[in-house]
Image (spheres, rainbow, N blue to C red):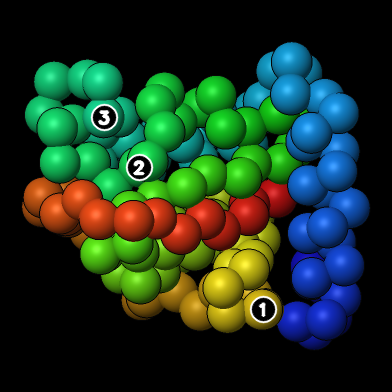
Amino acid sequence: MPENDEAAGQMSLQRNEYWNDHRDEPPSEALKAYVADLLAIWPDRDQAGGEDSPWSAAPLIHQAAGSYMYFPMIWQTCWYVSAVAARVAELHGLVCYDKQLGGLRPSIPDPPKCAGRPRRRGHCSPDIW
């Protein structure tokens, strides 16, 4: 776990470079489990029930390589969705860094079992590791 937001930002930059160079590497088991839990809340855009998914890319697991994941989500609902994503990351022992906030993403107390149908518009993109 990074000591502070600045350390998290540096780690995010390093991991983003790693992701760009290793995109073909399979995701870690931790990230596979993390993505499965997110998709249980909101399915991939290209799956049944995913037409209003908050994920801007599908399949979501393709945004993961090794122990790093960078994924875009629609702007309209990203504040809530990224808080849920941060909480699910915590439950998996992962870190969620939000570039828009410039720091570790605060989470919500408990993730929903089903979060409903967010609307599409723009996107934001937290980093998970």
Cβ–Cβ below 8 Å for labels 2 and 3?
yes
Q: CA distance from mark 2 to mark 3?
A: 7 Å
Cβ–Cβ below 8 Å for labels 2 and 1?
no
Residue occupying the point 55% across, 24% down: 62
Please tell me which residue lies in front, 9 or 111.
9
Residue occupying the point 22% across, 41% down: 53
- Residue type, label 3: Arg
Evaluate whether residue 34 shows in this view: yes
Q: Position of residue 79 (x, y in %)?
A: 35, 72
Instruction: Read off the residue under disc 1.
Output: 103
In this view, 60 is above or below 78: above
Quarter location, residue 19: top right
Quarter location, residue 85: bottom left
Residue occupying the point 63% across, 52% down: 128
The secondary element bearing badge 1 is classed as: strand
- Residue type, label 2: Trp
The secondary element bearing badge 2 is classed as: loop
Instruction: Read off the residue under disc 3.
Output: 45
Q: Position of residue 33 (x, y in %)?
A: 51, 33
In this view, 93 is above or below 17: below
Answer left or right for 70 relative to 120: right
Q: Position of residue 29 (x, y in %)?
A: 64, 28
- Residue type, label 1: Gly
Q: CA distance from mark 3 to mark 1?
A: 27 Å
Q: CA distance from mark 2 to mark 1?
A: 21 Å
Answer left or right for 46 relative to 28: left
Instruction: Read off the residue under disc 2.
Output: 55
The secondary element bearing badge 3 is classed as: loop
Please tell me which residue lies in front, 108 or 63.
63
Evaluate whether residue 81 shows in this view: no
Mark toward the start of the polypeptide (3 vs 1): 3
